[in-house]
Image: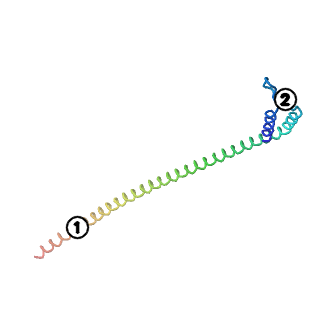
Amino acid sequence: MEILTILETLEELVERSASVPFSGKCLIDREEVFEIIKEMRIKLPDDIKQAKWVKEERQRILLEAQKEANNIMKDAENKIASLVDEHEITKKAYEQANEIIAGAQKNAREIRLGAREYADSVLNKVEEILTDATDVIRTNRSELK
């Protein structure tokens, strides 16, 4: 900022000016001081505008950074939610698969038991028929003798 340079020039003018003995005051060239003040008035609006622009630009950058940070946070939250959902979906799929397998195993057991009972029932019938046939054969043989 140029205004700081001008203020330093003013300080130098005061420092190099002749001092009035026993008073703590100094003699300054009035025209030179007015010239410095005039230069300050000219430069001050530019420096204020520049400072205002820097402040606004800083604010804009901060807002952009905040928006970007919020977007990153939302993306991260969505990704986490997606991963959790995928985990839940996978978990449910495993549960359903286990239920289907358990049901299939139960049905297989029931079918095996049913098949055994049916086979036992058929064999029992065959045994009864054979027993009856054997009895008939014995009776017929006895009659033949």
Question: Callout 1, which amino acid?
Answer: Glu
Quarter of the image that includes the C terminus: bottom left
- In the rendered image, the residue lying farthest to the right is 31
> Which of 61 and 22 lies nearest the eye of the viewer?
22
Tag 1 secondary structure: helix
Badge 2: few (under 14), some or many (20 or more) residues near its Cα, within 10 Å?
few
Report the Cα–Cα distance between label 2 and label 1: 143 Å
Question: Of the residues under marks 2 and 1, which one precedes in the sequence?
Answer: 2
At 82% from the left and 41% from the top, the residue drawn is 46
Against 3, residue 135 (above or below) is below
Q: Nearer the viewer, mark 2 or mark 1?
A: 2
Q: How is the image coloured?
A: rainbow
List x then y, in percent, for residue 107.
37, 59
List x then y, in percent, for residue 75.
60, 50
Q: Which quarter of the picture shows residue 113?
A: bottom left
- In the rendered image, the residue lying farthest to the front is 21
Against 64, residue 103 (above or below) is below
Label drawn at residue 68: none
List x then y, in percent, for residue 62.
68, 43
Tag 2 secondary structure: strand
- In the rendered image, the residue lying farthest to the bottom is 144
Q: Which quarter of the picture shows residue 45?
A: top right
As drawn, is 96 to the left or to the right of 145?
Answer: right
Question: Callout 2, which amino acid?
Answer: Leu
As drawn, is 57 to the left or to the right of 118?
Answer: right
Q: Which quarter of the picture shows residue 11?
A: top right
> Which of 86 and 43 lies nearest the eye of the viewer?
43
Label drawn at residue 27: 2
Per the image, the residue denoted by label 1 is 127
How many numbered discs?
2
List x then y, in percent, for residue 91.
46, 53
